[in-house]
Image (cartoon, rainbow, N blue to C red):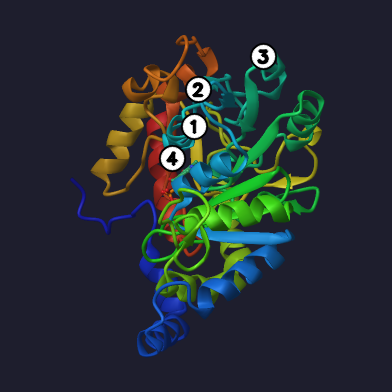
Amino acid sequence: MSSANPIPMVDLREQYLSLKSDIDTAVADVLSNTQFIMGPNVRTLETEIADYLGVSDAVSCGNGTDALHLALLGLGVGPGDEVITTPFTFIATAEAIAYVGATPVFVDVDPTTYNLDTDLVEAAINENTRAIIPVHLFGLPCNMHALQSIAGKHKLFLVEDCAQSFGSAVDGVKTGAIGDVGCHSFFPSKNLGCYGDGGMLTTNNAELAQTMRVLRTHGSTKQYHHTMIGYNSRLDELQAAILRQKLPHIDRFNQGRLRVATAYCDQLKDLNIQLPLLSAPDSHGQATPVFHQFTLLCDKRDELKQALKDENIASAVYYPIPLHQQKAIIEKMQQQPTLPQTEKLAERCLSLPIYPEMPDESIERVCTIVNQVLQ
Ligand SMILES: Cc1ncc(COP(=O)(O)O)c(C=O)c1O
């Protein structure tokens, strides 16, 4: 094992230190105000995020998983319904479908974008299909033009899983503002991350926003008056205060991620491996990824991972087992499909360290090892 300085997947400390005095002051203000639940920062953050994303309504909630759950509940998706999504994502996307008693239907991914292959979606639609959940995986927006046209034609809801894509856009429209509702996660390592759990729903449908608002606070519009069975899924005031300090810097943070990704692509360009796209295919519209992860595909994935580990460099496999092969999800499907592109990705994918402040020397150290192992 090398004694070189460790290179982590993500270094949250750097970003905190760069905003320390603002964040510390915002936290201290909440502590002295003692309005810890549904305070002024939560309300203001909702307005600020709605403005940033260009939607009429933003409804905060406890985390990204709850956001997906509340979105499906708000849209009335339930038992007997089918929801089309990608098998190459974090389990939360499918958990939300299971929570409402609907059935997940997995469609294979495009091997170059790692996102839903929109050419395969229509074949999966039947009379029970109610919604599609595209996941803008690793920060690359899905082909939303194609999905909007399919959803429009078949009268399906489009629920965007934006957990990994905060700040990305298609033709100038931010992800989370394109479909019927956008579901965001503020998990600490996300592009816009807080210091605990947090989530947000975004929509241009005021009626849907109101339903989701009621659902996230015990089904009540007025304290102790409950019109439906709801949930306790509130974003807490401390997290909202922290997010408000970070939101003004999100474009700069995403630029920092793009800098790292561009340097990786440049320094690894001579290898016979698949690198992630620096921009979406032309047919997807003008879309820029926000590089939540930098994920390459190579045959010697496990060997590369070990070589990086020997040099004190972190790497991660997102995701080793696709959802259609996960025990918990198999039980929820009507039949288990074979999804060759996804299965190949799961065997070959490796994510390298990436975060906005990642130093050039660290990028070079990572690339030296990758080049050594794969040349
Ligand atoms: C694609 C995707 N969807 C949903 C979630 C769930 O978000 P949270 O952890 O905030 O519940 C995540 C989190 O990792 C995710 O990556």
Q: What element carries label 3?
A: loop
Kindly identify the amino acid type of the residue bearing the numbered disc 3.
Asn
Q: Which mark is residue 126?
A: 3
Kindly identify the amino acid type of the residue bearing the numbered disc 1.
Ile
Q: How far apart are marks 3 and 1 (CA)?
A: 17 Å
Residue 156 visible to the viewer: yes
Kindly identify the amino acid type of the residue bearing the numbered disc 2.
Thr
Does label 3 or label 2 sit earlier along the sequence?
A: 2
Q: In which quarter of the image is the C terminus?
A: top left
Q: Nearer the viewer, mark 4 or mark 1?
A: 1
Q: How far apart are marks 2 and 4 (CA)?
A: 30 Å
Does label 4 or label 1 sit earlier along the sequence?
A: 1
Within 10 angstroms of label 3, few (less than 14), some, or many (20 or more) residues?
few
Task: Tell me what residue is drawn at x 28 percent, y 56 percent.
Answer: 6
In the rendered image, which residue does mark 2 sit on? 103
Q: Taking 20 as reference, is 55 above or below it? A: above
Q: Which of marks 4 and 3 is in front?
A: 3
Q: Classify residue 139 as left or right of residue 208.
A: left
Report ligand 1 position as a quadrant. top left
Q: Is mark 2 on a helix, strand or loop?
A: strand
Does label 3 or label 1 sit earlier along the sequence?
A: 1
Does label 2 or label 4 sit earlier along the sequence?
A: 2
